[in-house]
Structure formats: structure tokens, C-alpha cells
Amino acid sequence: MTHPVVPAIVNLDVPGPVISRHLYGHFAEHLGRCVYGGFYVGEDSDLPNAGGIRLDVVAALRALDIPNLRWPGGCFADEYHWMDGIGPKEQRPSMVNTHWGNVEENNHFGTHEFMELCELLGAEPYISGNVGSGTVREMSDWVEYLTRDGDSPMVRLRRANGRERPWRVRFWGLGNEAWGCGGHMRAEQYAAEARRYGTYCRDHGGNTLYRIAAGANGADYAWTETLMKQLGDLGCAYRPAPFMQALSFHYYTIPGTWQDKGAATVFDTGDHYRTMVQAARVDELITGHSNVMDCYDPGRNVGLVLDEWGTWWNVEPGTNPGFLHQQNTMRDALVASVHFDVFHRHAGRLVMANIAQTVNVLQAMILTDPDTGALVLTPTYHVFEMNKGHQDAASLRVDLPAGTPERAVGDARLATVSMSASRKDGRALFSLSNLDADEPAEVELDLRGGALTEVSARILTAGRLQDHNTPDAPEAVAPRPYEVAATRAGLRVHLPARSFVTVTGRLAGSDT
């Protein structure tokens, strides 16, 4: 049987926009077992920890070169009052997490613990402020508490709590999902709030804020236009107004209905293809929001941020429905690989993305067993690790003169082969996915403007799309070395069904 052959042309000597490392960002909300029982186990835990922060989780994420971590939410951000989470832990007031399980929290993981976590991870903090139920002063004080030096009420309070030097915190979210759990605001109403909050979130010393306005839900382009109107005039390339530097949007891959999203591990081939169609739709959404932004900001000074993305399934049977705990299969890995290919193509406008979420919640990198303490790396984790060489690399355009194989999925057409490429430090990295559940494909990489040496490859695949990792089978879906063939024009890559392959090589003549 002959397999589809996909010609792909890559000009190695024509670099495009740089792929920001922050497109590989993460998200940790006070939701289920993401923070408590995930990142934070407490100082009395038998598990190795530093101040209560679980060290094997830290080590696993450091291996991804994790660039940033968004906290404390999510919906939780707009009911979180940061002063309840500082000072001696035994004196911190408890709170009720009304959004996620209606559980009581003791606030033992707060600002200092989060900053210590980021320092252990080597990641930049991205803090979402409380616009929904907080005040402008509360958020302004938080910025001052974290980032100001010298002498002021907030600086003195920070020092009394054990931190002499200020931290560097660039990324600040002006609320979260203001159209929904963040206040059920109208776009015009939120735009006015964002202007106000953004104005009073000050730059202190050498810490320059990158303020991210809470943007649209999915394809709500009118919300994006309303925010862009606050920053400048239509078609004007002048420097945008200073109270926000970026705006966000959220998009989850949900092939079912909101009430019945589908199961994480029990699904058929049709469910898989419907999932891939929904995942690929992120390209349409980024294009749509970018087009609106280009009308007001043709110089692309304002960043677009997708700070919540990933699959959302029904919770695992027997778990708290408010904890959003789900398994993670080879299908989820392919959702991630498709998203990254899209992100790389939009690197000129998309400056950050944060998968939801990092540990034990939604499309997690890591699952921890509450009974045994076992840590499991998910298939999605492996896509992040295999792709980490794209961080801060120059994107390389991939031209497909004959297109790719397609499948009809309802009224939609699904391209079943996805690719992206980049170059950095004298090396090139290619990412290739075959979304077909049953049929392999061949990709002929026509490499122009250079040649590769020291070529190596890795593959992530599974016998079934439903395969996943557990404490008893932690490497059921894990990467392994792979062979690709050299051709006169470049490389030939065989893509088995349901597979993700990365290929890297040194650019001939490069000294680095």
C-alpha cells in the first residue's frame, strides 16, 4: 500500500518572526489539586519539598525550560485577596473557593510561596489581579509590595514578612474572563475598568510592567475591537496608550457539548477527528483576533495572549466534579502539537500562551497520585519537552505546494499532517504530526538555502489513541529515538498513524 507523500519546502536561510519562549507558558490555578496536592504539599509532607513546594514536580518542569507560570487564576483570581495570603501561615484567614468545589482554603500558598516556586522553576511569574471583586488600590498595592525598593508602606510590609529585595514581576493580568466569572461585564464596561486598573498598576524602579487585558471568549472579535479602540486610532501606527501592552483570549478544545464534553480515555475514531477539527480551529481564531488588532495596530506593538488553552473533558469518574481532574492520552498530545504549529506560524503577533493547567487539572503536564504520591508525566508533557528547542528560535516558513492529506469530518475538512520549523544557535528543529488514526504518511522535506548535519529524531506514538500513562505504566506513551532518511533535497520522514516526530540537525557551516 502506498502512503500519502507530502512535499514540504523549508528555506533554512530565511528566518521569520522569533517564537517567544512564552508561547510555552503554563497556568496554575487554585483549582482541585493543582496547587494544594500538586505544586504544594506542605512542609510536613514526607515527599521531598522546599518550604512545602514539591521538588520532583519542580524538577520535571525545569526539564521543559518552563518560561512562565500564570497564577492564581482563572476564575479564582477575581475572588482572591492577596493580603490574606501573606504573613505567618497560622495567622492567615481561610477562604471559600466558591468557583471550584466550594472547598475551604487556608491561604498557606500565597504570594511569597508563589514567588519562591517561580524562583525554583526558573520561570517568570504572571500574576492575574482581582478586578471582579477587588479594588484598584488592592491591585496597585500588590504591584508595589512585589516590585518596589526603597521605603513605602508596602515595602515595609514585605520586609516584615521576610523579603528584603523586591522581585521582578513583568506580567500582570488585569482580571480574568471579565465577560464571565470575572464580573459578567459588557465589553465597554470592562474596557473602562482595564484603563483604570492599568493606570494605577505602576512601574517601580527598573520593573516595567507588561499589562495584559482580559480578552475575548473564543471568536468574540467585537470584544477585541472594543479593547483595541482604547489603545489608539483606527489605522494609526503611533505608540499605543500606556495602560495595557497586550490583550488575551481563551479557547478550549471541546468536541462535545458544554454539558457533556466527552470522556478523556473512552472515545472512538470519530470523536478523535472531531477533537482535531476543534483543535485546528485555534488557527482561525488567532487569525481573526490578529486581523482586528492589525486595523488599529499595524505595527504590532500590542501583543496577543492565549492564556488559557487545552482540552476539556468530563472529569474522571469518582472525582470531585469541581476539581476538573482528567486523564491525558495520545489524543491530547496531538492537540498540543497542532496548537504549537499554529502558534509558531503566528509568532509575529502571538506573544504568550498558557496551557490549562500544569498539574492535576485539565490538560496537565503532570498527574500526582493522592494516595501513593507517585508522579506521572503525561503525553502532553512529552510534546512540550520535545518541542522546547523552538523557544526563542526564529520561525521557518513551511510551504506545502501540494497541500496535505485531508479527511472529511462532518461539514469540515481536517488536514491530517501538521508541521512547523525553526532555527536557533546553529541548529534547525522540525515538528511533524500525523493526526490520522490509522494511516501513515511520508513527508519529503526539501531543505533550501542550507544543509543539515548530525541529524537526529524522536517519536511519540502509541498503539492506540486512548493510551495514557499511569503510576503502574508511567512510560506507556513516551518518546524514543527515531530514524529518518536523507535524500538529495533534504530528508524523508515516515510518520506512523497517530504520531508526533521531531527532527533536529546542525546547520552546515555553523560554528555554534
Image: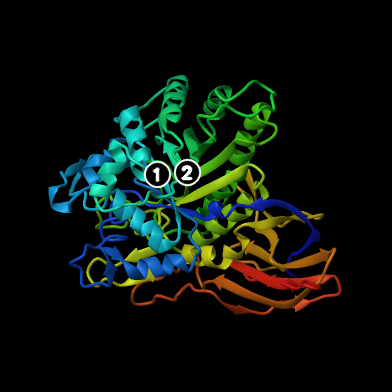
From the viewer's perspective, is 135 left or right of 20?
A: left
Bin the neighbour count of mark 2 within 10 Å (Cα to Cα): few under 14, some 14-19, many 20 and up: some
Vertical relation: 163 (above or below) 191: below
Bin the neighbour count of mark 1 within 10 Å (Cα to Cα): few under 14, some 14-19, many 20 and up: many
Q: Is residue 191 visible?
A: yes
The residue carrying mark 2 is 207
Where residue 337 sits in the image (x, y, percent)? 57, 59
Colour treatment of the image: rainbow
Q: Nearer the viewer, residue 421 or 486?
A: 421
The answer to whether the residues at label 1 and label 2 have Cβ atoms under 8 Å apart is yes
Where residue 308 sits in the image (x, y, percent)? 46, 45
Q: Nearer the viewer, residue 301 or 219?
A: 301
The residue carrying mark 1 is 147
Residue drawn where x is 26% and y is 60% of the image? 37
Q: Amino acid at mark 1?
A: Thr
Q: Is residue 181 visible?
A: no
Q: Quadrant of the C terminus?
A: bottom right
Q: Amino acid at mark 2?
A: Asn
Q: Nearer the viewer, residue 470 or 427?
A: 427
Residue drawn where x is 65% and y is 46% of the image? 346
From the viewer's perspective, is 493 left or right of 250?
A: right
Where residue 243 sits in the image (x, y, percent)? 50, 29
